[in-house]
Every structure is written in structure tokens, then in C-alpha cells.
Amino acid sequence: MSNGTQVNLATVGSDELKAMPIAVFNSYLDQMSNEAIARFKRMRKLNDAQKAAVERALSEPESKRKSRKGGGHTEAGGDKAHGGAKGGSAGEPAAKGPKETSLWKDLLLRLIAWWDGVDTDALARSRGIKRWKRKERPAKAAAAAVPEPEAPPLTRIDLLQKLWGDGFSLPGGIDFALRIAGAAKIGKSAPCLDLAPGLGGGMRAVARATGARFVGFESDRELAGAAAAMTGAAGLDGIAEIHPISYEGLSAEDLSTEGGYGTVFMREAFFAVEDRERMLSMIHGALQDEGSLVLTDFVVDSNPDRPVSQAVAQWRSAEPDGADPWTELEYRNALEAQHFEVERFDNITSKYLPLVKEGLRRFHDCLQNAKLPPETVPILMREGNLWLARSQALESGHLSIALIHARRVTPNGDNAIEEEDALTEGAAVDDDEIAMEWGLEE
């Protein structure tokens, strides 16, 4: 790292921090706000010289530290500190012009600047980034002169809904949820199970559209509590119930219901389950004969001739519970081993990515005037980093997202439900209709 670079000391490794010269340490302190320095002091174990430097920095006015000249203490981004726009220091090649960033990368840049306590534009200049700007229409530009009322603080649940819509914690909203449900035959006679309902928006939408009764098990307790409240407010208690439960503590008894479930859903969560074979076995036991398993999940490229993707590696490290996605072949083999017959395995990445980008665009607009309490910033950082990593991995082509529909079969082939009875369970959606709707090739 050079002294001319914006750095948050809280993100520097312990060994690097211990070996850092005190002059360099001081120069980084001079770039940070008092709030960021105080947070750093609480977070990290410092030696005596570093403690003294931190106390000195906190005792000085912030404006005095940031305007200090010499020794690399000038704020990153000034032309004099960096030799102007056309050239660098002696022995270094001339700097290229800044590259304009994308909307979601600009969002992450804003969050990093907030966390570091530095100016976003200065941080962008120090990294050679041209910030993303939305083109305003004349009417909007005129309206911008009128001050808007201050927005209330946003909670984590609020932030997720700003991204994905009211009642949702994943991309796509109601339309996407109904399209996914269209892969199965959902009727009123058998209940459905959702093993990753999030805030429950998709589950409630499908319950309303089909008349089916749903039960949801959500591994995130905060989401489960908020989802249960939303279900109650919607008047769907007993129709779309949601309970908190850990995947690792899930048992066959938890999934059992009289007569079995007609359909089991799970969105963008199976890849993080530690014992997936056990989970498939429990789902098979919970389904009635000919019942459906409908998954949307991340699937890794299986081409042995392609090098390991850095974007996929970065995505794996960004996932809070880790990520070890299966290839399509591994998925098919595991489903077959647990007595499922794969009906369809469709790559829907081209449909999914625009939904992610649309959510991030709405989120970016919300941040323009949002009032965020300090405890919200780490949540923003985490969420922004996660979806940036997911987007880059999907765009690399080494990772895809698949819509998987598998049907439960019994080992001896003696299915309890006759074909004509199965067809009366509900409005069946033809496979060709699904393919046409998604724009997929057979």
C-alpha cells in the first residue's frame, strides 16, 4: 500500500498492522474521520506507539489532520499529491484516465467511503474510478431544487425490501415467484413446504394464486420473525405460516405432515447446506408420491478445461455461510440417488441477472436521501458486497443459476397416486409453456 491511497486501518491484516511503520500509520489516520478512528480503536489491538498516535489524532480537529501537508498526509485524489492527471511519480507509468464504474459498484464505493469516514469522490479518484451518474430528466432536475423531507432510519428488513420489494428478501418479486411455482402442479388438497421463504412474499403470492396452504421454515430468525408478522398483517395466518428453524438441526419429524407435502420449494439456499444428501433424503420422505421438489440454486461450471474463476472464488468467500455449489452432473446424480426424477434443469441466469440489477438500482436511489444509523452500515456493506460478488460470478459464465424441478418416485416404482388422480390435483403447467415463458431452449 502507498501513502497516497485511501485506507481504512480496520481492514488491514494483523501482521501487516504490527509491521507498519509509525509514519505510514499516521498518514492513514490522517485520512480517516474521527468516527472511523474511534471505531478502529475499539476493534483492534494496538502497540504503545500506535495507541499514542490514535490519541493524538482524536485530540486534533479533523479538518486540521486532513489538510496536513507533506509526508503523504494530503488527502488522496489531489492533483499535486499524485503528480497531476497525466503522470505519476518518477519511475511510474503515466496513469490512465478513470474508468466509469457500474451502478452496483458505485453503491459499494459509497458504502466503503461511509465506513472509512472519507469522501466518496476522493475515494473514487484515489482508485482511478469515474463514478456512475444517473441522467436526470429536466423535470426531475427542476424538482431537485425543492428539499425533500428527511427519511426515517432504515432497519435491515427495510433495506432488504428496498432492494427486492415489499415482503421479499431475494430478487424477482411476485412475478418471479409465480413463474417458479409454475414448474410444479400445485393444488388445494396437499400443503406445500418452503424451506427458504425469506420474508415470505413469494410464499404468500403463490398461496393466494393457487389456494394452496403453505408452511415455511426460515433459517434466519430475524427474517422469520418479520415474515410471520407480515403474514399476520396480510390475514394469511394458517395459510402461509413461517417458523424459524436451523437447517443443521432439521429432522425428518420437523418435515413430516399427514399425507405428505405436494410440493417443496427452496430458493438460492441449497448450495450452502452442509449435508445436502441428508436434506434431499428428508425432503423425499416429506413429499407424497409424485410430489415435486422445485429449487432455484447456484450451479458451478463443470468444464475441466476452463481455469478456476477468480470471480467464483471471491463469491464463495463473500457468502456468510460459505458456498460449495454442485455442478449440474453432481446435482442430477444426487437427486437420482435419493429417488427423484429430474423433470427439468434450466439455466435461468439471463433472466435472473436483470432482476438483481433492477433491485440494486432501486437501492441506489433510496440511499440518496436515506438516514442510516451507524449499526446499519455493516449490514449495507455485507449486503452490497454479497450481491456484487454474486453478480460478478454469474456474469463470468463460470457460475449459473438453475431452475430445477424433480419429481419424487418410490424405489419400487409402485406409486400410490394414479396418473389420472395426479392430473386433477391442480392446474398443471405444461413444460413447453414454461420454456416459452422463460425464453428457454429445450
Image (tube, helix red, strand yellow):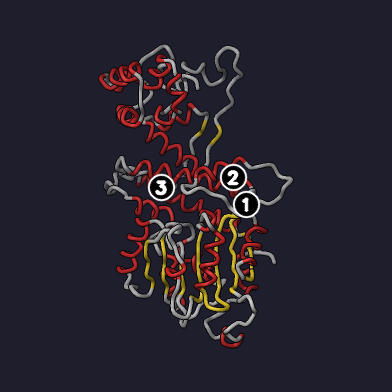
- The number of callouts visible is 3
Q: Secondary structure at mark 2?
A: helix
Q: Secondary structure at mark 1?
A: strand
Q: Nearer the viewer, mark 2 or mark 3?
A: 2
Q: Are marks 1 and 2 in contact (CB under 8 Å)?
A: yes
Q: Of the residues under marks 1 and 3, which one precedes in the sequence? A: 1
Q: Position of residue 186 (x, y in %)?
A: 51, 77
Q: Position of residue 342 (x, y in %)?
A: 64, 69
- In the rendered structure, which amino acid carries the disc numbered 1? Val
Locate residue 431 relative to residue 48 in the image: left or right: right
Distance Cα–Cα, label 1 vs label 2: 8 Å
* Vertical relation: 196 (above or below) 315: below
Q: Which residue is pictured at 27% across the width and 21% down the height?
A: 61
Q: Of the residues under marks 2 and 3, which one precedes in the sequence? A: 2
- What residue would you read off at disc 3? 365
Locate residue 38 relative to residue 11 in the image: left or right: left
